[in-house]
Image (tube, rainbow, N blue to C red):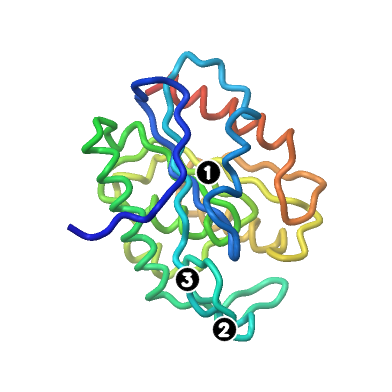
Amino acid sequence: MAEVLPAIEVTTAASPRFSVIWMHGLGADGSDFEAVVPELGLDGSHGIRFIFPHAPSIAVTCNGGYVMPAWYDIISLDSDSRVVDTAGILSSRQSIRRLIERENRRGVPCARIFVAGFSQGGAVAYTSALTHPESLAGVIALSTYIPTPKLLEGEATAANRAVPIFAAHGSEDDVVSPELGIRARDFLARHGYRIEWHEYPMPHSVCLEEVREIGRWLMERMAAA
């Protein structure tokens, strides 16, 4: 059996019925969003297992080949575009699929699994969820973009055409420009996805208002499951 990524886990109940797999951004690790859990404002009526995996350390071309935690290599970037390593994205997608499969073995079906990510992790969340062969509970995409639109067009699955998507971006983001986030939003809307869009006056980060909105959205989705 292929190795599962190491991860930090936070559970809100003894026997979680839902899971959230949440990917960090470039150069960070799974601890980056661990502190978000108590700030979500969840009411405790649904047991959730939050899984914060650690990306492997690889050389990142756009950062001078420096080795750091990354979900895939970024060859080059500017404020409104990216040239990325598609093979690396597919490898990370497979890693996320293994985490999903482990949750299935733990008794959480795909229909109760959310896939989330920030920045580079959000790009993997989009790719992993929208091409997953079984219907998932939802996607949370924060300060991110779609790295390979052609891959999504070719491999998007009917199972997740109706998956709920929460997408948010900072209007002052100078790392992943708001234009990239809006481009992803519009791409998904054109292809018929249900995307809920939020924008906040912040840089490349998250804010408390955004976190509370994610909590509200999660509770709505779980109540409907």
Q: Residue at x 31, y 45 (%)?
A: 100
The amino acid type, in three-letter code, at marker 1 is Ile
Q: Answer with the quarter of the image where residue 17 lies.
A: top left
Secondary structure under the numbered disc 1 in the rendered image: strand
Q: In this view, does 104 lie to the left or right of 32?
A: left
Q: Position of residue 123 (x, y in %)?
A: 51, 59
> Compared with residue 86, is residue 129 higher up or lower down, i.e. above or below?
above
Secondary structure under the numbered disc 2 in the rendered image: helix
Q: Which residue is drawn at 72% across and 65% down?
A: 175
Alpha-carbon span between mark 1 and mark 2: 27 Å
Between marks 1 and 2 in the image, the one whose residue lies nearer the viewer:
2
The amino acid type, in three-letter code, at marker 2 is Thr
Determine contact: label 1, label 2, CB under 8 Å.
no
> Compared with residue 136, is residue 81 higher up or lower down, i.e. above or below?
below
Q: Answer with the quarter of the image where residue 154 lies.
A: bottom left
Q: Which one is earlier in the sequence, the residue at label 1 or at label 2?
A: 2
The amino acid type, in three-letter code, at marker 3 is Tyr
Quarter of the figure that contains the N terminus = bottom left
Q: State the residue in front, 103 or 212.
A: 103
Q: Residue at x 59, y 75 (%)?
A: 82
Q: Residue at x 74, y 33 (%)?
A: 209
Q: Residues within 10 Å of mark 3 (few under 14, many from 20)?
A: many
Point out which mark residue 72 bears: 3
Q: Pointer 2: what residue? A: 61
Q: How crowded is mark 2: few (under 14 residues within 10 Å), some or many (20 or more)?
A: some
Q: Position of residue 52 (x, y in %)?
A: 48, 46
Q: State the residue in front, 64 or 210.
A: 64
Alpha-carbon span between mark 2 and mark 3: 10 Å
Q: Pointer 1: what residue? A: 140
